[in-house]
Amino acid sequence: MKIATDIGGTFTDIVTIDNAGRVIIDKTHTTPPNFEQGVLDAVKNVQERPDGIDMNEGVESFIHGTTVVINALTEKKGAKTALLTTKGFRDIYEIARGNRPDLFNFRFEKSVPVIPRYLRREVEERINYKGEEVTPLHKEDIQKWVEYFKGESVESIAVVYINSYKNDAHERATVEYIKELWPEVCVTGSYAVTNEWREYERTSTVALNAFVQPVAEAYVNKLEAELEKQGIHSKKYIMQSNGGSTTFANAKETPINMVESGPVAGIYGAAVLGKQLGIDQIIAFDIGGTTAKCSLIDGGEVKVTTDYKIDKNPKTAGHPIKVPVVDIVEIGNGGGSIARIDERGALKVGPISAGAYPGPIAYGLGGEHPTTTDANLVTGRLSPENFDMDVDMDKVREGVMKDVAEPLGITAEEGALGIIRIADSNMLNALKLVSVRKGYDPREFTLVAFGGGGPMHAAALAKDLGISKVIIPLAGSVFSAWGMLMSDLRQDDVKTNIVRLGDDTDFESINAMWKALEEKALADFAEKGISAANVVFSRNLDMRYAEQEHTVKIEQGTMELSADTYGSIVERFHEAHERAYSFRLEDSPAEIVNLHLISFGRVEKPPVAELPIIKGTLEDSLKEVRNVIFEQAGSLSTKVYLRDKLPVEVEVQGPAIIEEVSSSALIHPGMRAVKDKYGNLIIDTGVSENDR
C-alpha cells in the first residue's frame, strides 16, 4: 500500500491506497510546533479503524507534504544565517529592487533581509558575464570569515557569487572548503538551488534556503526516525513546490523547494483527475482551515513559475524565491478565518485565522471570535454532528452576535450570512486572479473544488464566474494527500542562456545545452534509484521580445531547434505573449532567456477503482431534513444526504446538502448533482449557454 500525509494549518490529512484501489482517508488535528506528532496521530488513526491498514502487509511508499518551511519563513523562525558573496556585492541583498507594489503608497516598507549586514561578508573573486575567470578565488578570505562566523554562532551559510549561473567553479570550491573547515555547519551554494540570472533574486533564494535548512533537516530527521519506529521502512518522499516529489535526503539539501509543499499536491491531483475524466481545462480550488488556494490548469498542464514571492502584500514587495513553484494564488480565507468589524465599521473576514488552536468557537478550545466555520454552522450549512467534539451552538451563535451582528444591528443569522458573503467575495477575487486577470475566460473551465471548505463554497462561486460544472472529488477533504499519491518524482533544471532567434542562430549550441541538462537529470535520478527508462523530459523556453525585461514560458516539446523549426516556436511565443499582455510585436526579434528542463521520474501509481454498486434509492441515503439559510432565497427546508450511501448516477436536486464526515457539499436551489462511478460529485450549477 501507499500512504500520503499532508499537514495543513488546522488539520493533518492522511490517505492510504492499497493495490486493489481501496482508499482509506482520515483527519487529525495539526499539532504545532511538533508537527510530526500530527502525522503520527494520523497513521495511528488509520491503523486502529475497523477497516484500517495493517503495517505488516507492507508499505511500499510514504509521501509527505509539510508546512514546516513556509511556517519558518513567515514567522522568521529559521537559523542564524551568514552570507559569503563577491567583493563589492555585499549589499545587493538589502538594496533589492526599486519597484514598489503601489507607487503612491506612503506606508511602503522595504522587506527586512533574513541575514543582517554584519553577517554578510565579501570574498575576493570574480567571474564575468561570459563565465570567464577575472579574479582567482582567495581562500584566505573564506578562512577568515569562517572563523568570524564561528565566533558569531552562525548555524548556516549561504554562498552566492556574481555570475555563478554561468560558471559555478568558485562557488563549488568555496562550499567544499567551508565543509573542510567547519563540517558541522549547514552550507548552501547558489548552484545547488538556482542557475537563473538576476543577482538579487538568486541571493534572496539561497539566503532563504540556508535560513530554513537546519530547521527542515531537524524536522525531516525526526519524522523519519518516528516513522521507522512505527514500522514504515519504505521509500519516503516529500512533496515539492513544483508539483513533483523528491526523496527525504534531497529535501534536506534544498528545503526551499518545499515552500508550497502541501497546497501544490492538490493542484497536481486536480490535473490527474481531469485526465481520468477527460477534462483538460480546470480551475483547481482548495479551501482549508487557514487559506484558500487556486490555480489554473490549461490543456491538462499545471503551470509552474519561478517568480514566486513570500510576504508580498500592499505594503512590501516581498522576498523573491527563484525556484519552480506551481503558479498558485493563496489568500487568508479558510474555515478558521476570523470575522470582525474594522475601525470603519465594515465587516472583514481573514486573513487572521484561529488556526488549529484555539480554532473556531465551535471547537470549544477557547476560541472567542466567530469564523467562517461558525457562520456555516449558524446558517445550517454545517451540522454539529460532523465535528469530533461537542459543539455548543449557543456559544457559536453568541460569538457571531457579539462580534458581528450587534455592531451592525442585525440578527445572528444575517450576521453569519454576511460573514459567508464576504468570505465568498474574497475567494471570488482570487479565482479571477488566476483566470480573468491572466487572459483566460473562466466560463471555458471546470471548477475542481476540494479541501474541507471547498465543497461548501464552490457551487456559488462557480455560478458567479459563469462556470457550469463543479467537481467535488472522492476524498475531497484530503485531496492534497491524494494528489501526492498520484505524483511522480520531478526535477526542474533552469539555465539562463540569452540567445536571439534567427536564421543565423547557433542552434547546435542550444541543443548541446539541452543534452547536458538531460544527462545531469539522468545522473540525479540514478542516485534516487530511478532508471533512465523511467525518466521523461519536457523542454520549455522562457522567451521575450528584444529589449523587454520579462518572459513568458513556451513548451518546446521534443523537437530539436533548427533553422527549419524555430519559426513554430516563435509563433507560439507571439500567441502566448498576446494572451498574457494583449499585444504582439511581429517585427521585434524574439529571444530565449532560460532553458527550463522538466524531468519526471515515473513511479507506479495506485489504481483508481470504480465504486461498488449501491443498491437502493435516493431516499435510502437521506439523513435528515433541516432548515438552511441561502442568500436571496432565505431559509429553506433542505434535504441532507450521506455521500457514501448515495447511489451512482442518481440526480440530487437543490437545495440539498451531501454530507460526509469531514466536509459537506452545498447544492443551491436550481442546481443538480450526481455521484459518478469513481465517487466524484458532479454539480451542474444551472448556468446555461445564454447565461454565459
Image (cartoon, grey):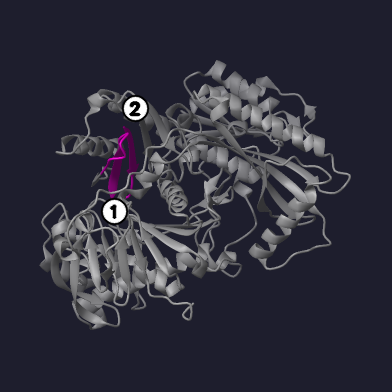
As drawn, the residue found furthest toward the right would be 504
Q: Give the main secondary structure of the magenta stretch.
A: strand
Residue 583 lies, in percent from the top left, at 72, 67
Image quarter in which the N terminus is found: top left
Residue 32 lies, in percent from the top left, at 28, 43
Q: Residue at x 48, y 29 (%)?
A: 250
Region rendered in magenta: 1-24
Residue 271 lies, in percent from the top left, at 47, 51
The answer to if 565 sits in the magenta stretch is no
Q: Secondary structure at mark 1?
A: loop
Tag 1: Cα neighbours inside 10 Å, few (<14), some, or many (≥20)?
many
The answer to if 19 sits in the magenta stretch is yes
Total marks in image: 2
Q: Hey, what amino acid is under mark 1?
A: Gly
In this rendering, would 601 be left or right of 612? Answer: right
Viewer-nearest residue: 232 or 641:
641
In this rendering, would 511 be left or right of 245? Answer: right
Q: Quadrant of residue 666?
A: bottom left
The residue under label 1 is 355
Residue 424 lies, in percent from the top left, at 37, 70
**In the rendered image of this protein, does residue 545 appear above or below residue 32?**
below
Q: Are marks 1 and 2 in contact (CB under 8 Å)?
A: no
**In the rendered image of this protein, does residue 274 appear above or below residue 25?**
below
The residue under label 2 is 224
Viewer-nearest residue: 418 or 267:
267
Q: Secondary structure at mark 2?
A: helix
* Circle 1 or circle 2, nearest the eye: 2
Q: Hey, what amino acid is under mark 2?
A: Glu
Viewer-nearest residue: 241 or 560:
560
Q: Residue at x 64, y 45 (%)?
A: 200
Q: Quadrant of residue 5?
A: top left
